[in-house]
Image (cartoon, grey):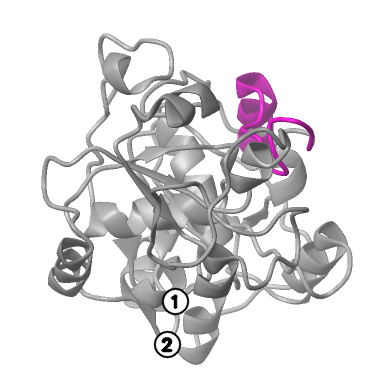
Amino acid sequence: MPADGIGAPGRARVVQTPCMVSPLITVPDLLAVLAQVTVLDVRYTLAAGPPRSSGHAAYVDGHVPGAAYVDLDTALAGPPGERGRHPLPEPEVFAAAMRAAGVRGDRPVVVLDDWSSLAAARCRWLLRHHGHPDVRVLDGGWGAWRAAGAPIEAGDAAIAAGDFRAAPGRLPVVDVDEVLAGTAGILVDARAAERFRGEAEPVDPVAGHIPGARNLPTTDHLVDGRFRPAEELRRRFAEAGIEPGAEVTAYCGSGVTAAHELLALEIAGLEGALYPGSWSEWVADRNRPVATGE
């Protein structure tokens, strides 16, 4: 379902393509349509050595039958630098990676990982942003698939090339200048509370948060690895002052976890923009203000 009137990234010039289905899919529902969808395995582990080798090795050991492995660092992000640790990839780089993974514009896609759906949400956001109309995240990810006793395939799957073409600009994106100018609406920081408060910073050179941001750790939107029900998420966002129609921008450390926050917002029936550079871009310039505490 293509969208019309697509403009360059930015809140005011975006026409969002409505997703044809829920942003989530359960294991039983995926089993029922497995032959009719493209499955992307985006497993990613920060703590177990090089992400590419750890994610791919886990995929080779076992994956959803027919799933293609997608590497977050090379397919779902550009090279790290002043734009942050995981800047958005160039559209054609992303599209080429998706074609190599078998993604077609007319075939639904299901994405999963073993990282609380953080990498899967990033992949889904990118596909939707670049024009794919039907992408869902497997709720509970690889753990839910295994717990259900669903079939598992080992080795590298033989993947037929897809035909996906990138048409970026479908979802709203906010840049650092808009954040500095205070025109990004309600800023939501998706990181853990101790990082937001500046009590710990395991990755970036400066601890704290963007002044005025509200902390809603995205992992709090999950229970046992699955998203909370929509009504519960809606209530939690309302308690943070986020109501329907509010302008919201999500950020995190490098723009990955923020996509998970946007997925939770979507499940709750709300909308938000992504600040891709996030904290890692913000603190690359030490002249930008930093806040600590609540």
Relative height, residue 109 to residue 15 (above, below): below
Query: Is residue 225 something that shows in the picture?
Result: yes
Q: Which residues are magenta?
A: 80-98
Number of numbered markers: 2
In this orientation, which residue lies closer to the viewer: 163 or 294? 294
Image x and y of residue 119, in percent: 58, 57
Mark sitting on residue 140: 1
Foreground mark, 2 or 1, reads 2
Q: For mark 2, give the secondary structure.
A: loop
Image x and y of residue 53, in percent: 87, 63
Q: Could you tell me which quadrant the C terminus lies in?
A: bottom left
**Residue, x 21% and y 70% (percent of image)?**
236
Query: Is residue 76 something that shows in the picture?
Result: no
In primary-sequence order, the first of circles 2 and 1 is 1
Residue position marked by numbered label 2 in the rendering = 224
Q: Could you tell me which quadrant the N terminus lies in?
A: top left
Q: For mark 1, give the secondary structure.
A: loop
Please check the rendered image and state whether residue 163 is part of the magenta-colored stretch, yes or no: no
Q: Amino acid at mark 2?
A: Asp
Relative height, residue 122 to residue 172 (above, below): below
Query: With 196 as the anchor, is 230 left or right in this view?
Result: left
In this orientation, which residue lies closer to the viewer: 99 or 8? 8
